[in-house]
Image: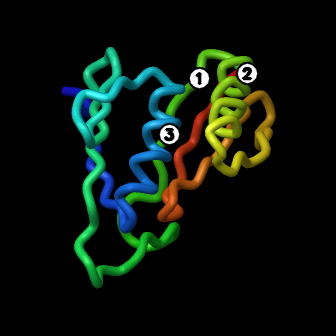
């Protein structure tokens, strides 16, 4: 079995759609419908609007902490950083962990999306 899809609930669907459209396009996903992106490996990201009056995302609360994607090399990681900057989004610094490197982007609700290079 493999992971098929991820559903992300957003408070501001327009802002989140713009953000995910930029990021997911940079890491190999294509938009299938207004709110669904998929990659060539069969993983889909489905963005939906959160119900009003629900609690906001909490990084260390119960539930999902972050999404993680692997880049093939540091050049690909830098390309994602430059692409997000060109799209007008905040771009965090690369974090270095021995031989591993990662960037933790934050979506408009604060959910982190990690792009990492290992080894």
Q: Position of residue 49 (x, y in %)?
A: 27, 61
- The residue shown at (73%, 48%) is 92
Whether label 1 touches label 2, CB < 8 Å: yes
Q: Which residue is mark 2?
A: 74
Does 50 sit above or below residue 38? below
Please report whichever mark, 2 or 3, sits nearer to the chain's N-terminal start: 3
Q: Position of residue 55 (x, y in %)?
A: 35, 80
Q: Which residue is mark 3?
A: 68
116 left or right of 17?
Answer: right
Does 35 sit above or below residue 79? below
Q: As drawn, which residue projects farthest toward the bottom?
A: 53
Q: Residues within 10 Å of mark 2 (few under 14, many from 20)?
A: some
- The one of 92 and 58 positioned closer to us in this rendering: 92
Q: Position of residue 93 (x, y in %)?
A: 79, 45
**Quarter of the image holding residue 61?**
bottom left
76 left or right of 97?
Answer: left
Q: Position of residue 4 (x, y in %)?
A: 22, 32
Does 113 sit above or below residue 101? below
Tag shown at residue 71: 1
């Amino acid at each position: 079995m493999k992971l098929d899809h991820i559903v992300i609930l957003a408070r501001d669907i327009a802002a989140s759609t713009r953000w995910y459209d930029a990021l997911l396009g940079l890491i190999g996903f294509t938009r299938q419908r207004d709110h669904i992106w998929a990659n060539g490996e069969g993983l889909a990201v489905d963005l939906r609007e959160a119900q009003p009056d629900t609690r906001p995302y909490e990084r260390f609360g119960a539930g999902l902490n972050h999404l993680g994607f692997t880049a093939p090399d540091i050049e690909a990681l830098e390309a994602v950083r430059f692409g997000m900057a060109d799209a007008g989004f905040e771009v965090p610094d690369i974090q270095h962990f021995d031989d591993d490197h990662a960037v933790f982007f934050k979506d408009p609700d604060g959910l982190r999306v990690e792009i990492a290079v290992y080894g």
